[in-house]
Amino acid sequence: MEASLEAHLDQLLRRHGELRDALAGTGIAGADFAKLSIEYSELTPIVAGIEKLRRARNELSSLAEIAGSSEDRDLRQLAEDELRVLRERLPGLEQQVKLALLPKDHDDQRNAILEVRAGTGGDEAALFAAELFRMYQRYAALRGWRFEILDLSETGLGGFKEASALISGRDVFARLKFESGVHRVQRVPETEASGRIHTSAATVAVLPEAEDVDVRIDEKDIRIDVYRASGPGGQSVNTTDSAVRITHIPTGLVVIQQGEKSQHKNKAKALKVLRSRLYDLERQARDSARAADRKSQVGTGDRSERIRTYNFPQGRVTDHRINLTLYKVDKVMSGEALDEITDAILAEDQAARLAAVETG
C-alpha cells in the first residue's frame, strides 16, 4: 500500500483509540455520546481489518527472516510453506481494508418506495408494468421483506398504469437502488394476430424512504385536494371523497393516493411518498455535485436511461450497464434469479469505486 494510505490507516487507528477513551470517561453525555458511539461503531470493523492486515505483515516479516537465516532445515521449510500461504492471503486482506474505506451510502439501510409506471407501448406496456411490480413483490417475499402496496392504477385489462409500494426490511434500498430506470420488454402480445414482436417499456423508480426529520414539508407549500376514488374504466370504487392528491407547489411534484377507504390514511401515505420524492431530489442533487464519484458508479442514475431488456422469445434478460445476459427470463420475472443481476451490479459498482479511489 502507498505511504499516503498507510498514513490514513494510522490516523484511523488513533481516532478509534481517542473515541474509545472518550466513551470510557464520564464527561460526555446525551447527543454527543450518541454521536461518538455511532462513529466508534462504524470505525471498529475497519480498525479490526487494519489490525488483521498489520499482524499478517509482521508475521510475514518474521517468517521471511526465519526462512532466510535459520540453520534448522525443517524449520526453514516450515517457514517457507507458511510464507507462501501468507503471501497468497495478503492481497485479499489489503483489498478488504480498501473496500472498508470506500464512502458509505448512508441510505443503504433504509426501506424503499418502489414506483412502477407504464411507458411507451399502450396496453402491452401496462401489462409489463404489472408483471414488473409483481416481480418485485415476489422478490421481496423471497428475501423476507414486507411489501405494502401504497397505490394501484389499473387499466382494466390486467395492466397497471402505475403502481407503488413501500418495501421494508434489511438492506432494501442497498439491493434495489440500481433498479431505477427504463425496463424494456420484447415479445409477441397476446392480442397480436400476426405474431410480430413488439417492444414496449416501463419505468421503475426506487426511492429511499424518508423520515419526518429528513424532509420538512411546510403546510403553505402544499395543496391538498380530495375527491372520489375511481377504479379501472372510471367506475367508482368508493362512495366517499377519500382519494387524496397532494401538490408540492415549489417543485410541482404531485402525489395521488386512493388505495384506502380512509381519507386520513390516504393523506398519510401521500405525504410519505412526497417526503421520499423530495428527499430523492436532494439525493440526486448531491450525486450530481459529486461528479467524480458519479462517474465511478454503475450507469448514470438517470431515470430515463434504458437499463434492462427482457426478451421473451429468446428467453433472455440483458442488463445494459454491465453487459450481463441471463437466459432465464422466467426465473428473473419470478424473482428467483433477480439476485444474480443485483449481485453482479453491486460487484461492478464496488470495483468501479475502488478503482476510482486507487487512481484518484
Image: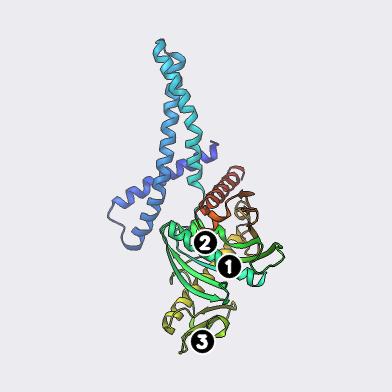
Q: Name the residue under label 3.
A: 236
Write down the residue under mark 1.
Answer: 129
Q: What element carries label 1?
A: helix
For marks 1 and 3, the one nearer the N-term is 1
The amino acid pointed to by label 2 is Met
Q: How far apart are marks 3 and 2 (CA)?
A: 28 Å
Q: Which residue is drawn at 49% across and 37% down?
A: 94
Q: Distance between the residues labelled 1 and 2?
A: 10 Å
Q: Can residue 281 be seen in this view?
A: no
Instruction: Return the x and y of residue 180 as percentages of the image width and height.
Output: 58, 62
Which amino acid type corresponds to the residue marked 3 in the rendered image? Ser
In the picture shown, does residue 197 fall above or below 91? Answer: below
How far from the left and from the top, in percent, is residue 283?
A: 55, 64
Going 40% across and 58% down the picture, which residue do you hit? 144
Q: Looking at the image, can residue 146 be seen?
A: yes
Q: Tag 2: Cα neighbours inside 10 Å, few (<14), some, or many (≥20)?
A: some
Instruction: Describe residue 74's horizontal placement relative to residue 300 as left or right.
Output: left
The three-letter amino acid code for the residue at tag 1 is Ala
Q: In terms of sequence position, does the residue under pointer 3 or pointer 2 come before the other?
A: 2
Q: Say which residue label 2 marks.
A: 135
Q: What element carries label 2?
A: helix
Element assignment for label 3 = loop
Q: Which of 148 and 279 is in front in this view?
A: 148
Q: What label does residue 45 carry, if any? A: none
Q: Label 1: how many residues lie within 10 Å, few (<14), some (14-19) or many (20+)?
A: many
Which x, y percent locates residue 352? Answer: 59, 47
Residue 208: % across, % down: 49, 64
Mark 3: few/some/many CA within 10 Å (<14, 14-19, 20+): few
